[in-house]
Structure formats: structure tokens, C-alpha cells
Amino acid sequence: MTLGGPSVSLSELDQRSREIFRAIVESYLDTGEPVGSRNLSRHPAIRLSPASIRNIMSDLEHAGLLYAPHTSAGRLPTEGGLRFFVDALLEVGDLTREERSQIEIQVKAAQSERTSEQLLTEASQMLSGLSRGAGVVFTHKADARLRHVEFVRIEPQKALVVLVADDGSVENRIVSLPPGLPQSALIEASNYLTSLIRGRTLAEARVELESQRDRHQAELDDLTAKLVEMGIATRTGTGADSGSLIVRGRSNLLSDLEAEQDLERIRLLFDDLESKRDLIQLLAAAEGGDGVRIFIGSENKLFSLSGSSIVVSPFRDQDERIIGVLGVIGPTRLNYARIIPMVDYTARLVGRLLR
């Protein structure tokens, strides 16, 4: 079974391949059973012989979109194939007026209890009933004091941020990483931010980090100006682009120990500023995150062993800060087209009611 991402783009699939792939995925989402070429040849939108369909299925399998269970001659979508379908071919509609009304009635009934916990519990149960999956809600206190933060890479440019509060509660967020950020930088960020963040909220830690960066930038400017004035170095660029320092005549440094120390200090400050920029980006990402997120099978490290998928969306407080996420966990053959708008609408409704 192919678990990696597909090796093709939508533009590389011709119309017949798309129709056959769509028919196989939709059948899988409906029944969970493999689909063979003979059954596909009876599909009203596919007017091909079983032999022609088998050739196309073989190509789709080679591309990593399908696989053949050893017990059947039919095909099923791989996890990469499901991701490709969700990203490129899934047609997500909107909820009907009746569906919106049903969600509002059930969720608003809990609002009379005057507790956010009851409201979130009812929203979770409602999603479970409508989706036939498991409703899930993750919440956190917007101003929680933290004692530990850790970044765990789950994709080349995505990481799981684990935030541990003083009260022992744990929150996980998925964030984007700057391109090319090495693993060592994540480890260093986790260690440094844990020491910085202890007893602070995320917002307070970010303010402190930005303050440190500004102080270091001011010190760097002073030292650089000193070396330039002495004729030892030339600074290139201006303003935000003044990030390069060209040293002229290193022999000059031998006669001025203080200048050599200043130059080393500048080098360290340049390095420190770069790390501060990376850390501030990570903290900003941890505070952000929006829209419906879909994790299929092993894409979701928290549920990868169970072969589950999760569809989640954040909800916000009156200051537009994310205070939690809610969604649905179920098998990889979730009815994504139906569940995505359901989760999105419920999250927005819960956010409004909590405000």
C-alpha cells in the first residue's frame, strides 16, 4: 500500500482518469469496499471497457493514488490518494437551511445553561450525531500562564506545538514553519522558549521576545557605526536591509583589541537577531491558525495508528483570539463534503455564542 503523497498533479490526469479515480474514491467513501474494473464499466459516466479501465487503474496505482488489497482484484484509494481527492476534486457545498436550523437549535439550547462547558459539550454531541463520527473539542484559556512549549516536526514545513499550562492542561496546535528550518532550530526554540515563557502567556512571551530583539538591534547598530567610523568595516544596505558588514584589512584589528572584540560581538548579535526572528515567527504561528483543517490517516500523528481522519476548525473569542477547536474524528472514509461545511458552521456559531 502506498502511503506517500501522489506523484501527479491534477493537470496531469486526463478526463477519463479523473472520472475513474473519482468513482473509486466516492465508492470507497460510501461502502469502504474495493472497486473492480467490471463494476466501473457499468458506471453511467464511464463508457469504457473493463480492459481499458484496468489500464487506467494501473496508471493511477503507479502514481500512488490507488492500491490493490491482496484479497481483491479491485482498487482502493491510498491515503495520498484521499488527500489528492480532498484537495483537488472534492466538491464542498453549503449546508441547507434545515441543516443550519437543526445545528442552531441544538447548540443554542445548551446556551441557556449559562456555561461554556455545556455549550461545547452539546456542540460536540451534535457533530457526533450528524456525522456518525466522534465529536471532539479542544479548548484553552486565552490568558493561560504557560510552563512548557515544544515544537515537534510532523512535515517538512509543519510542526505540532505542544503548550503546557501552569494548571497542567495541554494544548496542541499545528503551525507552518519557515522553509529550510533545520531540526536543530526547533530543539533550540523549544528549550529557549520554555525558559522565556514560564509564567507568561503566549502574547506576553512574544512581546518580551520582540523587546529583546529591538535591544539587540540597537546594540548592533551602535557597534557597527563604531567600526565603520574607525574605517575597519563598511556596512551595506540601509534600514531593514542593513544586514551585511564588510570587514576591510583584518590586520587593522591586530592593533586594536577592542575593535576585534566589537567585531566578534557584532557577529554574535547578527546570529542572535536571526534566531530571534525565527522564534518570533514560531510564536506568531502558534498564536494563529484558521479555517477548517483536515488530517487524513498518518498525516495526523495523534491518531495515525488507528487509521482515523480528523476535520477541525477553530473558534474565537470577542478579541478574535483562537480559544479552541472543534470537529469530528472518524475513519478515513468520512463524508468530507458533508462534514467540512458542518464543522465550519458549527465552529463559527459556537464562537458567536461564546462571545
Image: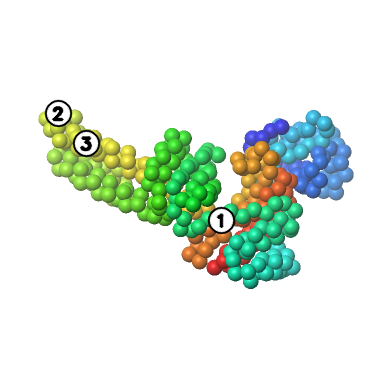
Mark 2, other Cα within 10 Å: few <14 / some 14–19 / many ≥20: few
Q: Position of residue 141 (x, y in %)?
A: 50, 57
- Residue linked to disc 3: 263
The quadrant the N terminus occupies is top right
Q: Position of residue 348 (x, y in %)?
A: 60, 63
Disc 1 or disc 2, which is closer to the eye? 1
Check residue 252 in the rendering and tell me which mark sits there, or answer none: none
- Residue linked to disc 1: 139
Under mark 3, the amino acid is Leu
Determine whether the residue tagged by mark 2 lies in a helix, strand or loop.
helix
| Residue occupying the far left of the picture | 255
Disc 3 or disc 1, which is closer to the eye? 1
- Residue linked to disc 2: 254
Residue at figure coordinates x 48%, y 50% from the top left = 165
Residue at figure coordinates x 65%, y 60% from the top left = 121
Looking at the picture, tell me which residue is in the foreground, 49 or 197: 197
Figure quadrant of residue 253: top left
Which of the two labelled residues, at mark 3 and mark 1, occupies the earlier sequence position? 1
Q: Are marks 3 and 1 in contact (CB under 8 Å)?
A: no
The quadrant the C terminus occupies is bottom right
Looking at the picture, tell me which residue is in the foreground, 104 or 92: 104
